[in-house]
Image (cartoon, rainbow, N blue to C red):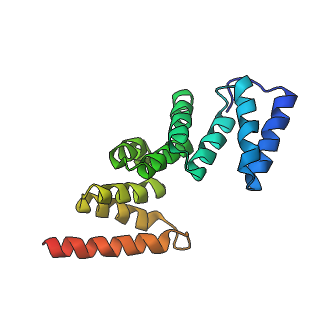
Amino acid sequence: MTSQKMDDSTLKTLSNATNAAKQGDLDEAIPLLKEVLSEYPDNEVANGMLASIYLQIGALEDAEHRFTELLRTHPENPLARFQLGMCYLSMNRPQEALSTWQPLLADQEEFMAHFHSGLAQLELGNHKESYELVQVAAHRMPSNHPLYPKLLEVRSDLIAVLEQAE
């Protein structure tokens, strides 16, 4: 949602940015999104797209800033919350990722934040907590999801570690 209605020219700029991003032309999309945000700084779509592009190209501090600002103005945005957690995980800040994802774990159908929270717990050396989160994700993630084989591998590794610890 946007906090104010955009004029036609800015909507066209946002549309052009969206098309550029879809085509993988991120160098074209970034200045267009910045142009939209110069007129509508709290625009949810433009902020989310720009933050996601920054995350994709590895500009992690810029991504963190944009996702944080997006959540400040749109705290209910689950995609921004998930992506901010991914940003923290990429920055080797697993505890911050876990805190960011915590609200998403209440969703009874959610599996991505569970899986990645399990990976964050694994980074922290918390094997039991990691296994519990990965197990929830395994029950919810569709078996045809691209990450499902990785989830099964992580779960298998965790089972072996936990059995060895007994």
Quarter occupied by residue 34:
top right
Residue 134 image point, x, y percent:
37, 63
Image position of 8 (left or right of 85): right
Residue 23 image point, x, y percent:
77, 56
Report the front residue among 6 and 95.
Answer: 95
Quarter occupied by residue 39:
top right
Give the quarter of the figure containing the C terminus.
Answer: bottom left
Image position of 141 (left or right of 162): right
Q: Residue at x 48, y 57 (%)?
A: 112
Report the front residue among 83 and 25.
Answer: 25
Q: Residue at x 75, y 52 (%)?
A: 25
Total marks drawn? 0
Residue sitting at the far left: 166
Q: Is residue 27 above or below residue 123?
A: above
Image position of 137 (left or right of 144): left
Q: Is residue 160 above or below residue 36?
A: below
Give the quarter of the figure containing the N terminus.
Answer: top right
Q: Is residue 83 above or below residue 1?
A: below
Report the front residue among 14 and 75.
Answer: 14
Residue 55 image point, x, y percent:
56, 48
Report the front residue among 24 and 108.
Answer: 24
Residue 101 image point, x, y percent:
42, 46
Q: Residue at x 79, y 27 (%)?
A: 6
Q: Residue at x 45, y 52 (%)?
A: 90
